[in-house]
Image (cartoon, helix red, strand yellow):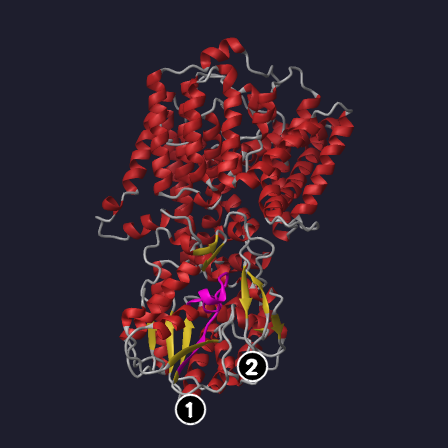
Amino acid sequence: MVTASAADGPENKPRDSGVQEGPALQRSEIRPGEFLLVAIELFAVLHVANKFSIEEDYGLLTLLPCVLGGFVIHAWAPLKLKLPCFFAVSIVGILAVLGPYAGSAVIVAGLVMIGLCHLPAPYSVRVGAILGVAALMVALRAEWISTPFDELPIVIVPVLAAMFMFRLVIYLYDLRHEKQAASIWERLSYFFLLPNVCFLLFPVIDYQTFRRTYYDKPAFDIYQKGVLWIVRGIVHLLVYRLVYYHFTIAPTDVVDLGSSVRFMVSTYLLYLHISGHFHLIIGILCLFGFNLPETHHLYFLASGFNDYWRRINIYWKDFMMKVVYYPVLVRVKFLGLITAITVATIVVFFGTWLLHSYQWFWLRGEFPLKANDAMFWGIFGLLVVVNSILEARRGRRRTLGKSVWSVGAAILHSMKVIGMLVTITVLWSLWNSPSLGDFMSVLSAAARSGPWDWWVFVAGLLALIALGVAIQFLQHRGVRVALVGHSPPARQAAVNSCLTLIALAVIGSNTVYRTFDSQMPEVVASIKQQRLSDLDLEQLDVGYYQELLDIGGYTSALARTTGRTPSHWVNIREYRHVIKSSDMIDYKLAPSSRGIFKGEELVTNQWGMRDKEYPKAKPAGTYRMALLGASYEMGSGVKNHEVYEAVLEDMLNDSAGEKPYKRYEILNFAVGGYTLLHYFLQAKSEVLEFNPDVVVLALHYNERVRIRGHLSRIQQARPEIPYPAIAEAIRELDAAAERSPKQFQESLDSHASTVLRWTLLEMARLFREAGVPVLAIYVPTTAESKKIKTDARDELMKLTADVGIPFLWLENPFGSRENIERLYIAEWDTHPNEKGHRKLAESLFRLMQSRPEEFALGGAPNPAGVQ
C-alpha cells in the first residue's frame, strides 16, 4: 500500500537496533540435534542444486559449499564472533566466485566507499565524496574511460553497484539519524552480504531492519526458515525453467485468443525467476541469523492495486516508502491529505520507473527509457493513486472477532483476485513485449478470435472464481490448503523442506524418470540444465539483425547472456576487418587481413578466406572441396588452424595408406552471419573460379530464421536486386510493413521459406550446369536442443530432396550434452572452442569415410588418420 497504515508492517516502525548480548545470546544457541537436522537439509540442498544445475551461470554452485561450511562454523561460534565470521564467509564467497583479482578489487573498492561514509567531515562532504566515486563508476560502466582490464567495467563495477547503489542511499539516510551506534561488523556485513556476489539483482534490504532482526527469534527457527526459503526458491526456479523452455512464445507467433493468453501468462510467470532468486537470497541470510522478512507474499492472489503493491517485491515497496513517499508526503501535506497522497504516489512510481532504468544501467550498461516502461509504470501508478484515494476516503475497515463467511463475499473477493490477475498479466505483457507494436499485435490477435474462443476464456475465468470460493470455504472451516506463503513453525518447516527435497531428488534421478513411458524424461532433462530456450536461441542467432527481432526483457536468458558480453566481443558486421558492400551480399572479410575477433587472431588469405593461401588454379593431383558456411565454419573465437575445416584438411592429408589424391584442399568461403542466400551469391561470383571437385553447404538449424533476418536488411538497405523472385519478395514486404508490424512479421516468415526454397533450387541448377557436385551437410550446434535439431534437420532434408541436392548430417558430434558448456568459447558465447571444432572435424572425417561417393572422392581415405 502507498498510504501510511499499520498494514505496512512492523518493519517500518523505529526501534532500538543493535545486538543485545543477553536475550540474543540465548536465541543464538542451537541444540546439537537441531543443528544436525539443518546441516543434513543443507547437504540435500547442495545435492539437488547440483543435480539441477541451479543458477550455475550465476556462480551459485560455487557459493553453496561456502554457505554450508560457513554455516557450520557460524552456528557454533560465540555470539560476539558470529558477525565477523559472516563477514569472513562473505569475503571467501566473493573470492571464490569472482576469482582473486576481481574479487580483491570488489572488496577493496567496497571498503573505500564504506570508509567515505565515515570521513571526519560534514555530512554534505561525505555525500559529495560518494557521488564523486559514483560518477567515476558511471564513466567506467559506460566505458567512457578506456581501461586495459576487461573485467573492470563488466564484472567489478556491476558487482559493486549491486552492493552499494541502493544500500548506500539507505545507509546514509539512517546514518544521519542513528541513535545507537552499530559495530564495525554490522556495517561491513550489511554491504558484503554473502549471496550478493551471485545475484546482482538484489532485494533492497533496509539497514535498520537488517540490524533489528539479527537473532530476534531462536536460532533453530531462523535457520529452518532459511532452509525452507531456499527450497522454495529452487522450486520457483524449476517452475520458471518449465515455463521458459516449454511455454513461452514470440509475439509473432500469436494468432488468436488462446496464443495471446499463452503469451501473456508465460511472460508474467517468468517473474518466478526473480522471486526464486529473492527467496534464495533471504534464505541464505537466514542461515546466518538475519531473520529478514519475506520478499514476496502470494502476489498472484492480490485483490487490488494497493494490495499488489504491498505483496510483490516488498523490499522495494518499503524502500520507496521510506526514502521517497513519506518525505514527499510530509513536504506537501499542506495541500490536503488526498492531494498529498496523490502527489507522493505519483513521485514514487515516476521514481520507480527511473530507478529501474538506473538499475538496468549498472547491470547491463544501458539506460533504457522505453515507451513500454513508461506506460507500464504510468498506468500502474495511476491505478494505485485511484485505489489510495478510495481507501483514504472510506478509511480502513476493521473487524473484531471471528469473521462471518458468506457466499456473496467469497464470490466478490474471488472476482477481485481474478480481475487483478488478468489486469496485471496484461500490463506485465505490455512491459515485457519487445515493442509497443508487438503488444498491440497480440491484442489485435485476441480481438480477431471468434465467439467460441471467448466463451472458453470466460468459462475458464468462472472456473477460477469457483475454485477461489471453494478454497475460502475450506479455510473458513479451518482447513489449511495453502502450501506456500505462510511461515509455519520450525518443525513443520523442516517437514516441508525435507519432503520437497526428497521429491526433487527423486525427480532428478535418471533411473526414476526414465522408467516412465511418456514425455516426462525429456521434460525433466530440460529443466535439469540451464540453457537458452528455443525462442531465445532464435533471437541470439539473429543478433546480427537485432533491429528486426530484439527480445529484451531482464527475465530472459538472452538478456542475461548478452548482458555479460564484453564490449570488445562484437558481431562479425562490426569487426574492423570487414568490408561493407552495397550489393545483396552486404559484407565480406577483407583479403590479406589480420586482426583479433572474439579473443583470437583471425587471418585471411589474398582471396578474403579465413584459410591458407591457395592458387586459384587447382594443382594436378589435388582434391579440392569448397566449403560454404557461417560462423561455425569460419571459426568464431578459435585460431585459424583450430577451425574444423583446417583440422579436417590435415586429417585428410595425414591419413595413412593409399590415397586417390596426392593432396587434399578445403577452401573455406565461410563468413559469420552468412545465409544460404549468401552462399548462392558467393557461388555465382567466386566459388566456381577455383574449380572445386565438390561444393559442401554447411547448414544449421536456423537457416530459415537467418534468411528472414537478411531479407529484412535487404528491405532496409535497398541494394540492387538482379533476381526477380527476391525483388518481388521485397516489394511485398514493403507493402506489409506499411500495414502493421504484425503483418510485416507474417510476410517475412512466409517469404523466408519461399526464398530458402528458391535459393536451394537455384544453387542446384547452377552447380548442375557447371558439372560440379553439390552436397548439403547438417552441422549441429552446441546450443540446440534435441527437438530443435530433429525438426530443423527434417525440414532441410525435405527441402534439399525436393531440389535434388544430397543431404547428410553429422550425428551427435559433441557427445553427451551434460557438460556441453565445456565446449563453449566463452561463458557468454556458445560457439565451439578448439575441442568442439576437433569433434566436428572427426565426425565429418568419419562421414567422408563412410560416404566417399557423395564427396566425389573416388575412394575412401584410410581411417587411421582419426585420433
User: Helix, strand, or loop for circle 2?
Assistant: helix
> Does 532 sit above or below residue 30?
below
- To which quarter of the image does residue 257 belong? bottom left
Q: Tell me where the magenta segment starts and ends, as one range.
A: 623-644
Residue 769: image tag: 1
Disc with the residue nearer the chain's start (1 vs 2): 2
Quadrant position of the N terminus in the picture: top right
- For the residues labelled 1 and 2, the Cα–Cα distance comes to 24 Å
Q: Is residue 651 left or right of residue 316?
A: left
Residue 670 shows in the view: yes
Residue 481 shows in the view: no
Q: Position of residue 434 (x, y in %)?
A: 56, 56
Residue 727: image tag: 2
As shown in the figure, which amino acid type bears the numbered disc 2?
A: Ala
Name the residue located 60 percent from the left edge and 54 percent from the top edge: 567
Residue 575: image tag: none
Category of crowding for the residue at label 1, using alpha-carbon neighbours closer than 10 angstroms: few (below 14), some (14–19), many (at least 20): few
As shown in the figure, which amino acid type bears the numbered disc 1?
A: Glu
**Camera-side mark, 1 or 2:** 1
- To which quarter of the image does residue 451 belong? bottom left
Quadrant position of the C terminus in the picture: bottom left
User: Is residue 450 covered in magenta?
Assistant: no
Name the residue located 61 percent from the left edge and 64 percent from the top edge: 574
